[in-house]
Image (spheres, rainbow, N blue to C red):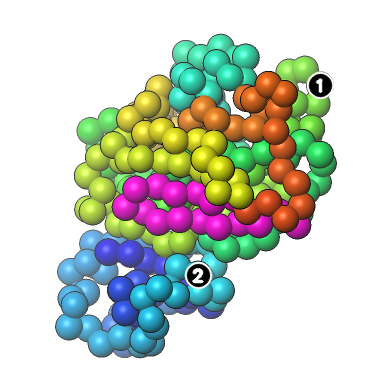
Amino acid sequence: MRIASVAGRAVVVRDDGFVDVALASEGTLPSETLALVAQIDRLTSWYSPEVALTEEIAAADLALDSRIGPVVTSPSQVFAIGLNYRTHALEMGLVTPPKPMVFTKFPSCLTSATSTFSLFSDEVDWEAELVVVIGSGGRDLTVEEAPGAIAGYCVGQDISNRALQLLGSPAQFSLGKSHRNYGPVGPWITTADEIPDPNDLAISCSVNDILYQDASTSDMIFSVFQIVAYLSTVCELHPGDLIFTGSPAGVGQGHRPPIFLRSGDVVATTIERLGSLRNVAE
Ligand code: ZN
């Protein structure tokens, strides 16, 4: 099942349109995705293909509907994992961390699959990432318990102002990745029951139709379930929390000389079975 936030309301996305979850369930299910992801089991037991569409839309237009917002707004926590693909650690000239390297993208950077973003320096870069959406969450989860804590997955783009990120030593990651609209997440949540192995998905990023990142989530150093379990040993994970799980090789900083985004560039980020983002630099 695919769940999106359309004009702020939680919908089930079908090939032919949207089902407004709160309307169609007559208020027994919540109207916002942040609350709905805590009740995925109730949603899946209520929903059936016989539920009537609230709005019909031609299939080709669905993902580009400008009313689709970020998959959740104002989650309590947004985690991001640095250097989680060996090839990316190499290209950045940084050593592979012994445990997941964690920073945050502050939640005010979250935006939709089709939003534009401003260039806050001459060194703004792209990072295609698989994003985990926490469902029930919890504390001290084992790797075996982690899948049950996850609501689903979406495509993310960890847009990074390298000038701010790498200013000084040691580098500080969080601010340089948290400018307005530097966290596109979408176009929708694909529920975890449809993605039994999140570490077996093709992931790619192109800029102006030039393919720069082309990898598999199987190349992660720390798997999705290991990351969820590890984070939960420190922080309680809440429904709707997001985890950006790291980016493969092929970012602009990794090129010699580096390549950074310019005004008008179109950043297209795609993950197998989850969809695509299309974000334009202003
Ligand atoms: Zn990243």
Q: Is residue 248 above or below residue 190?
A: above
Q: Is residue 95 visible?
A: yes
Q: Is residue 123 above or below residue 277?
A: above
> Closer to the observer: label 2 or label 1?
2
Principal SS element in the magenta part?
A: strand
Along the viewing direction, whichever of 105 and 28 lies nearer the viewer: 105
Using the image, tell me which numbered label, if any, was put on residue 64.
2
Give the secondary structure at mark 2.
helix
Q: Which quarter of the figure is the N terminus placed in? A: bottom left
Q: Is residue 278 above or below residue 257?
A: below
Please report the residue visible at 33 percent of the width from the left and 57 percent of the height from the top.
190
Highlighted range, magenta: 267-282
Q: Is residue 245 left or right of residue 223?
A: right
Q: Which quarter of the figure is the C terminus placed in? A: bottom right
Circles 2 and 1: CB distance less than 8 Å? no
Using the image, tell me which numbered label, if any, was put on residue 168.
1
Kind of residue indicated by mark 1: Gly
Kind of residue indicated by mark 2: Leu
